[in-house]
Amino acid sequence: MTLSASEHATSRQTIGEHGGALTQLRAYLAQSQLPLDSRLPPERELCQTLGTSRAELRKALAVLEAEGQLWRHVGKGTFIGSRPIDTMADIAAITRRTNPTEVMRTRLLLEPEVTRVAALMATSAQIAEMRSCLVRMKQAQSWRQYEAWDNRLHRIIAEATQNSLMLALLDTLNAVRRAVAWGRLRANKVKPDADHHSFTEHAAIVEAIEDRDMERAAAAMRVHLESVEKNLLKSRGSGAGPKQPATNEA
Amino acid sequence: MTLSASEHATSRQTIGEHGGALTQLRAYLAQSQLPLDSRLPPERELCQTLGTSRAELRKALAVLEAEGQLWRHVGKGTFIGSRPIDTMADIAAITRRTNPTEVMRTRLLLEPEVTRVAALMATSAQIAEMRSCLVRMKQAQSWRQYEAWDNRLHRIIAEATQNSLMLALLDTLNAVRRAVAWGRLRANKVKPDADHHSFTEHAAIVEAIEDRDMERAAAAMRVHLESVEKNLLKSRGSGAGPKQPATNEA
DNA sequence: TACCTAACCAATTTAGAATTGGTTATATTT
DNA sequence: AAATATAACCAATTCTAAATTGGTTAGGTA
């Protein structure tokens, strides 16, 4: 695969040498064996290498780009392969568009199903860690500590699905949840009551997972989240001002 | 609230002037009324403004930082409020860790529930657009066109939940799905068969949504995704080489 | 008409200087 | 001796200006 292409092209001179640069460019790419996502020489160099003009080279490049064989961008260059997609999901942008209600509905949609899968997939080590969280939550001396173990429990359940993609989506959801927080201050109490509703609810979830009862696990998580939602609305609605905002509790 | 703080501090000189700078800094912050997330003057300036040394100022700043009233970072500066969380979810990183099986399991977990909510929330305009997608999918002259309308249908269903957060999570999932693609080439056929399984399955989903039958809508989506999964495994397992890889079909 | 050359534009990258919090060593003060 | 002030340095970050690069237009040439 040498330069014979340009010689063959003599037959094309009758139709105005259209595609001469294109043929040369194709030959160049075949010969250079550039790996995927690698950059071609800049147009100004490449056109000299191929002994053509920049305008002609660009026509040829346009064809290959339309074929999806390469992509270009001002300032960046010309690259082999297909244009890379946006690799970042902007959590800040999501936070601007959403609201606490959406966060709650999304959790209510996701987490019961996640818990169902966790009941099937959780390792015994993970179940042990869940139990440990339950204990530490009861021992917590402050809401701050309580929330830390609460978050940890929910994340272990997510990890128990053995699905890194699901885990990443839940982490995104949680990042939004924290950012979209209604308010920051916790209600007047310094730490959770001993009979805080979450204690028994969390225990029910972990027990169902331990029993490998998928249906019961999903239901228990749903009950828990609905209970959290109710508490959220109560503390919002009860005439309390900014001094008694909702919490981030999971 | 002027400089009287430093005069009051005479009583503290007995305990070594500890907190003198801290008191001054607190007064400065109260007086300056800096809005949230705004930057303080650099330490080198601020310590002169407060008439103290940089080391003393830094001790005071450390206290306020521990109290959560401000946060600092080399090269950035010192800021009022709490440290911002990572605002970006790296889709590329997720793609590296996951695999097509996880993608399928995640879709199977998410999309039936999403469809259930869509059946409840979809506007009639959205349902009309879904129907339009069904028609255009049948009319598609290439897999490329078919997939475009297929993707569009699934996204309208997601939009129909009226939940921008859920939509963002599904968009992230789809970005990963495209990036994690097994392969790029479609099976030998140029366009979908007229009796392609997806046609009736998609129709069943949209019909259930139109009937506001949440249970049936969720079930129909589950059937569809399981069918897609089966096809995926078939084209993978049937001894076909890289020439017959799986598709990105939704 | 087809092609080449040159110049300019805007997006991007690159390199280096300047800035900034973090740290350490050495006076200076009390 | 203890506490504080001063100075110098480090590393992360930002800022700035120049260089690079694809995209575009104008004018000349065969």
Image (cartoon, coloured by chain):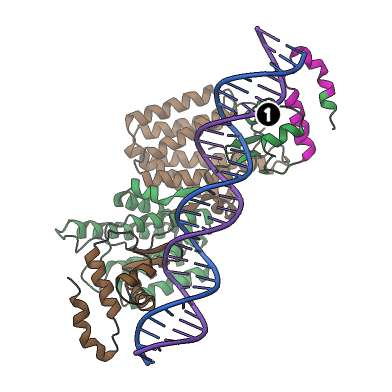
Chain colours: A brown, B green, C blue, D purple
From the viewer's side, name the closer residue of B242 and A186: B242
- The magenta stretch is B7-33
Magenta includes B14? yes
Give the percent coordinates (x, y) of residue A237: 68, 44
Please say whether residue B124 is one of the residues in the magenta stretch: no
Q: Quadrant of residue A144?
A: top right
| Chain bearing mark 1 | B
Residue A91 at least partly seen: yes
Q: Residue at x 60, y 43 (%)?
A: A181
Q: Does residue B136 sit above or below A205 in this rendering?
A: below
* Vertical arrangement, residue A218 with respect to residue B223, above or below: above
In the picture of the structure, the residue carrying the numbered disc 1 is B54
Image quarter hosting the N terminus of chain A: bottom left
Q: Is residue A53 left or right of residue B167?
A: left
- Where on the picture, by quarter, is residue B202? bottom left
Q: Position of residue B1 (x, y in %)?
A: 84, 32
A99 left or right of A158? right
Q: Amino acid at mark 1?
A: Arg
Asked whether residue A104 appears in the rendered view, the answer is no
Bin the neighbour count of mark 1 within 10 Å (Cα to Cα): few under 14, some 14-19, many 20 and up: some
Identify the secondary structure beneath mark 1. helix
In terms of depth relative to the viewer, which is nearer, A70 or B96? A70
Predominant secondary structure in magenta?
helix
